[in-house]
Image (spheres, helix red, strand yellow):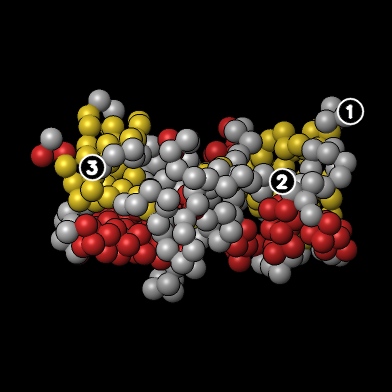
């Protein structure tokens, strides 16, 4: 058991998990980081990141996460490109099963993130980061003076549409029903905004674009009316998917407390869960901000919380 016994086990490898790894390794806790099926997290499907402090010229998402990882490894973290299949937090040391191998941790930091809900059509994946986005606050700046579509009808979509009007010349909301699901105040705000148009009873049939001469970008969108079946096309510079996020918490159901949206619950002002020695950082416990910099901040907090917990146990 000794080879696989660790003071800190980190599950997840986005900004939260890798920042936790940097801090835990600098505290000589020799953490092991299980990177899962999307090493680097959501930033690896982002092209240019312009809002992370320290990079005034911007940086590619995958490159930024490679730098995070390099820094964690430099200080002694071990990164393993495998997915955790089950956990047992009922007794200490905590048991973490990775494929067919068992690891035991005195503390565990959960940083499995959240995934944007997507339409799962081929063109969406092809143009993700090249005109298709799942984060208006991350990418809205790139669409100054351009025409964009926002897909969805809940508070997320209405909020993102309003935000995008700061930059875009026109924002069109696409909703599969004939009325929004969002809150009354958000509905009114969107419908009163002169820059926002709405296409009701419709879904995205396809994202149109060009991929020639090494340049890839969105040029338009195909919409299908769910009542008539009619398909129409419209020019578009960008398409924002705003049908919500799903926290990656399936592994912890029945083990760690969650809210009604299945985000992990932590004690206010900390990363502590209800199980002493288990901490949660990043988007897995944050349905509100969902930014790389805030995730990194809570990754730092989780490592410090874990370090202090270990000291108290000694």
- Label 3: which secondary element: loop
In the rendering, at what x and y percent does residue 247 appear?
52, 44
Q: Quadrant of residue 207?
A: top right
Residue 172 tag number: none
Give the residue at x 42% y 63%. Answer: 270
Tell how many labels.
3
Q: Nearer the viewer, residue 127 or 287?
A: 287
The local crowd at label 3, few if under 14, some if 14 to 19, many if 20 or more residues have their Cα within 10 Å, is some
In the rendered image, which quarter contains the N terminus? top left
Write down the quadrant of residue 29 in the picture. bottom left
How far across and how far down the image is residue 96, in percent?
29, 36
On the image, numbered disc 2 is attached to which residue?
151
> Mark 1 or mark 3: which is in front?
3
| 302 over 211 or under it: above or below | below
- Which residue occupies 70% across, 62% down? 164
Give the mark toward the camera: 2 or 3: 3
CB contact under 8 Å: marks 1 and 3 = no
For disc 3, the marked residue is 93
Residue 228 badge: 1
Label 1: element kind: loop
Quadrant (top left/top right/bottom left/bottom right) for the C terminus: bottom left
Q: Which residue is at 79% across, 46% downward?
A: 181
**Where's residue 146, x and y in %?**
70, 61
On the rendered structure, is 285 left or right of 275?
right
* Image spot of residue 291 (x, y percent): 50, 60
| Label 1: how many Cα within 10 Å (few below 14, some 14–19, many 20+) | few
Q: Is residue 58 above or below residue 70?
A: below
**Tag 2 near tag 3, CB within 8 Å:** no
Instruction: Decide which of tag 2 and tag 1 comes sooner along the chain.
Output: 2
Compared across the picture, whether 213 is left or right of 190 comes to left
Is residue 180 found left or right of 298 in the rendered image? right
């Amino acid at each position: 058991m000794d080879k696989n016994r660790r003071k800190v086990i980190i599950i997840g490898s986005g900004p939260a998990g890798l920042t936790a790894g940097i801090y835990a390794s600098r505290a000589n806790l020799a953490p092991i980081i299980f990177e899962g099926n999307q090493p680097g997290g959501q930033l690896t499907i982002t092209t240019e990141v312009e809002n992370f402090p320290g990079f005034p010229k911007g940086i590619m998402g995958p490159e930024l996460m490679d730098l995070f990882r390099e820094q964690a490894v430099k200080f002694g973290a071990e990164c393993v490109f495998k997915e955790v299949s089950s956990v047992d937090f009922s007794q200490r040391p905590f048991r973490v099963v990775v494929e067919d191998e068992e690891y035991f941790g005195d503390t565990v930091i959960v940083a499995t993130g959240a995934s944007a809900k997507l339409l799962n059509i081929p063109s969406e994946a092809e143009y993700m980061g090249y005109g298709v986005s799942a984060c208006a606050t991350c990418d809205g700046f790139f669409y100054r003076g351009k025409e964009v579509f926002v897909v969805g009808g809940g508070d997320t979509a209405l909020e993102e549409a309003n935000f995008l009007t700061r930059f875009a010349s026109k924002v069109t909301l696409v909703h599969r029903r004939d009325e929004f699901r969002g809150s009354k105040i958000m509905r009114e705000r969107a419908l009163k905004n002169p820059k926002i148009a709405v296409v009701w009873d419709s879904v995205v049939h396809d994202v149109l674009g060009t991929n020639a001469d090494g340049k890839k970008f969105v040029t338009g969108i195909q919409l299908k009316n769910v009542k008539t079946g009619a398909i129409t096309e419209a020019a578009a510079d960008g398409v924002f998917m705003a049908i919500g996020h799903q926290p990656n918490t399936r592994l912890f159901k029945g083990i760690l407390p969650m809210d009604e949206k299945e985000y992990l619950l932590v004690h206010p002002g900390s990363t502590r869960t209800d199980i002493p020695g288990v901490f949660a950082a990043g988007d897995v416990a944050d349905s509100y901000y969902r930014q790389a910099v805030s995730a990194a901040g809570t990754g730092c907090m989780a490592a410090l919380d874990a370090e202090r917990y270990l000291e108290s146990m000694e």
